[in-house]
Amino acid sequence: MPENTLTIVVVTYNSAAFVRGCIESLLAHAPKVPHRIVFVDNASSDDTVRIVKEEFPQIELVELEENIGFGRGNNAGFAHAPARYYYCHNADAYLQDDILDKAVEAFEQDPKLGIAGLPLVYPDHSPQTSAYAASTPMKWALQGLAIGPIAKAVIAKDPTGLAAKALGKTRMGKTFAATHSGQDPVQSERPFVEEVDWVCGAAFLLRHELLETFGYGFDPDIFMYGEDEEFCLRASSAGWRIAKLNTTPVIHEFGWGKSVKSSRRVVDLKFDGLTTTINKTFADRPFSRAAMHAMLRMKYAVWKSRSASK
């Protein structure tokens, strides 16, 4: 077992616009447990590496010769600084509070807790979904019918109403309802450790045993998109608990998500990542796999048309 308690891993790629704020937040809210902060740069062509080297020499920097993607970049950080636990933090995300010690304590208290995500908000502090139900043909079909915006409006209008409560009792709707209820995660009556199907990789903790269980962390076949869901579902299938920690949210710019509408390359990467995720997650469910691929192709057509219109 590694002696280091926690390694904070940040994967960067042309992240100069965010990297100062990201590092400053990590240093301001550094945990008290023994830890290392590792930035893995995916061959950035902007000033990301220079900023880290010159302005933050206390940060350990791993410079890769090529862009190997989000998941493999995090895996490189795990290998560089082995620890009992790892915290993956997006380059466009910022801690607001000293929450990492509490997160580590949650893992220490529950030896079956394999992965835990932190709540997310946008820079204006509006809620951003960070925990999800597993993808299924039914879930994707409902998303295709634009149920999300309707449900969000219903919850916002009456967070304690019958419709919101009913949605919150369903497997697909409980994390969505909790996110958009307007409740402060810290002040809510929800448990600190709340089991979910999967959590967003933007602010994501895991224990070292997962790497030993599988021989790797994030799936190296996924460049980006879908790797967090695949990892969580794979860990859950192996008997590990997946949870969201109801603590002070992490501010997340959601830069990649915004770029989907303007970049054909990002659209293609998302399609490829989700294709691989579907193939692996639904390997033993051929009919569901076929349905998911059909819906993904429809999503892809919409994404392409949006990127072409920008």
Image (cartoon, rainbow, N blue to C red):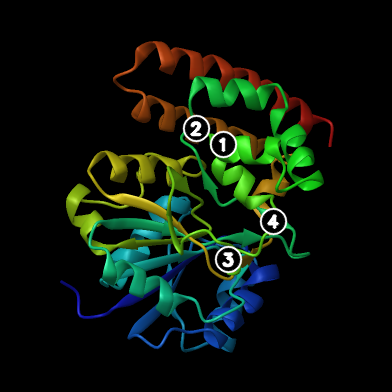
Q: Is 137 above or below relative to 232?
A: above
Tell me residue 171's x, y (percent). 49, 35
Mark 2 and mark 1 in contact (Cβ < 8 Å)? yes
| Residue 310 relative to residue 86: left or right | right
Q: Earlier in the sequence, mark 3 or mark 4?
A: 3
Q: CA distance from mark 1 to mark 2?
A: 6 Å
Residue 91 tag number: 3
Q: Which secondary structure lies at badge 3?
A: loop
Q: CA distance from mark 3 to mark 4?
A: 19 Å
Quadrant including the N terminus = bottom left
Q: CA distance from mark 1 to mark 4?
A: 23 Å
Residue in view at x 84 percent, y 37 percent = 310
Q: Where, by quadrant of the figure, is residue 289 drawn?
A: top left
Q: Earlier in the sequence, mark 3 or mark 1?
A: 3
Q: Is 266 above or below relative to 25?
A: above
Q: Which residue reaches farthest right?
A: 309
Front residue of 41/227: it is 227
Q: Where, by quadrant of the figure, is residue 296 drawn?
A: top right
Q: Look at label 1 and name its amino acid.
A: Lys
Residue 274 tag number: 2
Q: Earlier in the sequence, mark 1 or mark 4?
A: 4
Q: Look at label 3 and name its amino acid.
A: Ala
Q: Earlier in the sequence, mark 3 or mark 2?
A: 3
Q: Look at label 4 and name its amino acid.
A: Pro
Structural crowding at the residue carrying mark 4, measured as other residues with C-alpha within 10 Å and reported as few (<14), some (14–19) or many (≥20): many
Q: Where, by quadrant of the figure, is residue 285 drawn?
A: top left
> Which residue has dot 4 on it?
127
Mark 2 and mark 3 in contact (Cβ < 8 Å)? no
Q: CA distance from mark 3 to mark 2?
A: 22 Å
Instruction: Name the mark nearer the viewer: 2 or 4.
Output: 4
Structural crowding at the residue carrying mark 2, measured as other residues with C-alpha within 10 Å and reported as few (<14), some (14–19) or many (≥20): many
